[in-house]
Image (cartoon, grey):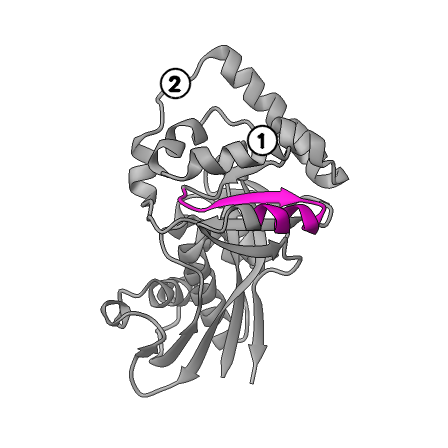
Amino acid sequence: MIKVHVPATSANCCVGFDCMGMALDWNSTFEFMHSEKLEIEGCPEEYRNEDNLVVAAFRKACDALGKEMPPFRLKIDSSIPFSRGLGSSATCIVAGLMGANAWFDSPLTKEDVLVLATKMEGHPDNVAPALFGGICVSMMQEEKVWCRSLHAGDWHGLVIIPDEEVATREARKVLPQTISFHEAKTQVAHAMLMEIALCRSDEDLLAACSRDYLHEPYRAKLISSYGRVRELCEKNDLPLWISGSGSTMIVLSTDQKELYELKKELSFLNTRMVKTARKGAEVLYE
């Protein structure tokens, strides 16, 4: 049996739109076992077929390796919610690719898997940290995917998960076609300072540069509780981001006690304490 562990991710990291992502210590597990036919358990009935994203990714890896896809039994154990901005689709893609690679004795490197995953996902900001762990900055350049990990400090996080879903397709529809020159240069400054803040565990600087102009002002309108959460975070000088395309939000701090206090104030919402995950996707054989 092949078992693949994949962490949840928080993409964009505020000003790192489509290029920065963070792995969280919230893992999903995918088991691949020999079978005479495709069998899937651990997901809703409508996804128990060949259109399942894990299966599609497994097939993608088989095609890349020039192998015929074997029948297998797939068991999914995941509590990461769908359409909430926590990389649920990235975990499925990475799991399928890693599972197929392991099935055929792992001829692909993680860098090879990143290219395949990016082609499926469309951009690397979720799949990169899901594969490598930590906080990753990545970009696509024609057929090449560039990815580097930050030497970030130990950050605690509070994930805030509203009941409402925000589909990525809908979240992209609200984005502006242009922004002003002033907003563009401020965005660049915030992005450069954010890397320094994350690596130096500088919470004050992180809070100061967690101001985005590309997506958050527009996506915030899709999240009914955003205004209240933002108000509480500003009162406590805590950095707040929309995770991925939402509706999840995430607050970071070097002091876990600060987040527990905020968690109490946000008792009207579903929350979860997390940390940045050092490890990315991992394959075990049993």
Where residue 103 sits: x, y (%)?
Answer: 48, 76
Circle 2 packing at 10 Å, graded few (<14), some (14-19), many (20+), is few
Amino acid carrying label 1: it is Glu
Which callout, 1 or 2, points at the residue further toward the start of the chain? 2
Left or right of 39 on screen, residue 204: right
Where residue 91 sits: x, y (%)?
Answer: 46, 60
**Which residue in the rendered view is the most extreme toward the top?**
181
Residue under the point 52% across and 50% down: 159
Residue 147 visible somewhere in the drawing:
no
Image: magenta residue range: 246-263
Left or right of 82 on screen, residue 129: right
Q: Report the residue marked by disc 1.
A: 234
Foreground residue, 31 or 221? Answer: 221
Instruction: Say above or below: 128 vs 280.
Output: above
**Which residue in the rendered view is the most extreme toward the bottom?**
36
Q: Report the residue marked by disc 2.
A: 178
**Which residue in the rendered view is the most extreme toward the right?**
200
